[in-house]
Amino acid sequence: MSDEPDPREQPAPREDAGGAAEPAAEGEALDVELGLDEVEPEDAESEDVEVEGEPDDTESDPAEPVDAEPEGPALLIALVPGVTPTKWTRVWAERRPDLRLRVLPIAESEQEEVLRDGRAQIVFVRGDVRSDSLSSILLYEEQPVAVLPRDHAFADAEEMDVADLADEHLLQEPSTVPEWAALAAEIADGTRRPLPRMAGLDDAVEQVAAGVGVLIVPQSVARVHSRKDVRVVPVSGVAPTSVRLAWATEDKTDDVEDFIGVVRGRSANTTRGTAATPKVESRAKAAKAKAREAREKAEKAGGGRKKPARPGGTARPAVRRTRKPRGR
């Protein structure tokens, strides 16, 4: 069977709270604009973004030249499957052409580890951050969906409840979907069988297509592993999954702060972040400083002398004013 998705049967993109759309596959170039299905290849190539793919098992031809790694500094970004940061990388390329981005696709199991071992400075993570040494901000939440065989009873449904999957075999650990585990018949009667050997979600979706069981995953993850012999249906009764931006608290550099600002939608003139957005003084302060500078120049030009006294050497006599009584 082909693992390539059929574009005619893919669900329409859904905008989440953070404005993110559904993703490109893990390890592929980030060429999908948030909120759009596709962008032209030349648009993606215009960004100064380097994407590192996962190593594959195929041997390369020794005679084939290998592209040299770009030289110079880079901001190291990692992201879990299903996250598409193209919207933010484009803004970064316009705002910080002096610093390229190196994007590393990773598995969810190593989303915190890459920050601790220095492989990444910023990571798009899924779910909560557990380590006290890491900080994060919420970007958006994702709709949970069920991945079903093409001939499933709910394959053509617009939406289903998690209770509709109570009699199904879940091809995941029950702890990953506690809402299903609380209703599952195979857990209640003790008939749940061990999971088949699966190297990853591609294998799990293969098992779904074969009718072995079902999956409940975030919509963007289902889109990454979409194929024409399975169906994706939104599921109610399951908590949405959050996508967050995380970084090591003690290693928060000015460049990291600038990238956080881009993701949060700060303008280029914001006063936060010092790498490329220096603090901008208000107009009033700038005017005062300019007037003070002009005054100092005038004093220097006059030798620092005071204004001469009035001719005649006599001071103007003081005039005493009295208030006229009212009514007279």
Image (tube, rainbow, N blue to C red):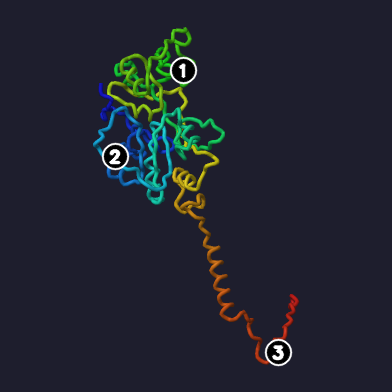
**Residue 177 in the image: x percent, y percent?**
46, 21
Left or right, residue 249 beside residue 208 = right
| SS type, badge 3 | loop
Which comes before the other along the chain, label 3 or label 1?
Answer: 1
Query: Where 185 sits versus 91, above or below?
Result: above
Q: Nearer the viewer, residue 77 or 137?
A: 77
Read off the residue under disc 3. 314
Residue at (27, 32) in percent of width and height = 60
Q: Nearer the viewer, residue 119 or 261?
A: 119
| SS type, badge 1 | helix
Q: Nearer the viewer, residue 203 or 126?
A: 203
What's the CA distance linking mark 1 and mark 2?
A: 44 Å
Read off the residue under disc 2. 66
| Cβ–Cβ under 8 Å for marks 3 and 1 | no
Q: Amino acid at mark 2?
A: Val
Which comes before the other along the chain, label 3 or label 2?
Answer: 2
| SS type, badge 2 | loop
Point out the image quarter for the C terminus. bottom right
Read off the residue under disc 1. 174
Rate crowding at label 2 as few (under 14), some (14 to 19) or many (20 or more) other CA atoms within 10 Å.
Answer: few
**Residue 273 in the image: x percent, y percent?**
50, 49
The residue most toward the left is 63
